[in-house]
Image (tube, helix red, strand yellow):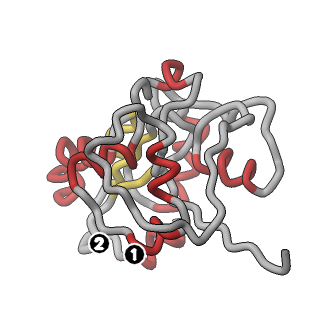
Amino acid sequence: MKRAILIVLDSVGVGAQPDAAEYGDEGANTLLHLYLKEKPQLPNLERMGLLQVVKSTTSDKAELPSGGPVQGAFGRALAKAAGKDTTTGHWEIAGHILNTPFPTYPHGFPEEILIPFREQTKRGVIANVPASGTEIIEKHGAEHMETGDLIVYTSADSVFQIAAHEDVVPIEMLYRY
């Protein structure tokens, strides 16, 4: 093989992993649920085998499109690395498998992380809790708009996430943070 093209659909899962319950992901199957509810038209990905991967996760194929002939190689894999965050997954694709997961922050980030963040950004921090992005913006968006403080949150992984309105914090500035 002279060349391989790897397409990563970040956070687009195809069936729950055996350890899904540890992360609150029981029954996770983003692509199957997308196909059953929204009926997406993804002809190029389907020609590469996407539908076959989705079909491999369910015994009920009645509501899924039949799809045409597959012109690519496809497959499904189980993660070997400890943890479930994006960085861990990307490192594993590249061949580096973590034996110890990155730390998670079920009670928010400690001050030893927040103090230098506040100093660098010259802004306050709102929230600092585990949450979904849409929920945290809904709950703290108005306060952010009034104060200019940054909404900081995490989820079930180790990622430090910042939510900000681009009229308050321009995208270029967010990249510098």
Of 121 and 128, the residue lying toward us: 128
Q: Residue at x 47, y 37 (%)?
A: 57
Of 1 and 68, the residue lying toward us: 68
Q: Residue at x 39, y 62 (%)?
A: 67
- As helix, strand or loop, the secondary structure at mark 2 comes to loop
Q: In the rendered view, tell whether residue 30 sits above or below residue 3.
A: above
Name the spot of residue 13 as percent of width and height, x first: 48, 45
Amino acid type assigned to the residue bearing label 2 in the image: Glu
Of 111 and 172, the residue lying toward us: 172
Q: Going by the picture, which residue comes out furthest to the top?
A: 21
The answer to which image quadrant residue 101 occupies is top right
Q: Which residue is mark 1?
A: 171
Q: Is residue 136 left or right of residue 12?
A: left
Label drawn at residue 166: 2
The answer to which image quadrant residue 99 occupies is top right
Callout 2–callout 1 Cβ contact below 8 Å:
yes
- As helix, strand or loop, the secondary structure at mark 1 comes to helix
Of 104 and 177, the residue lying toward us: 104
Closer to the chain start, of discs 2 and 1, is 2
Name the spot of residue 94 as percent of width and height, x first: 78, 57
Q: Residue at x 71, y 31 (%)?
A: 82
Amino acid type assigned to the residue bearing label 1 in the image: Ile
Name the spot of residue 42 as percent of width and height, x first: 37, 68
Q: In the rendered view, tell whether residue 161 sits above or below residue 6.
A: above
Q: In the rendered view, tell whether residue 103 sits above or below residue 95.
A: above
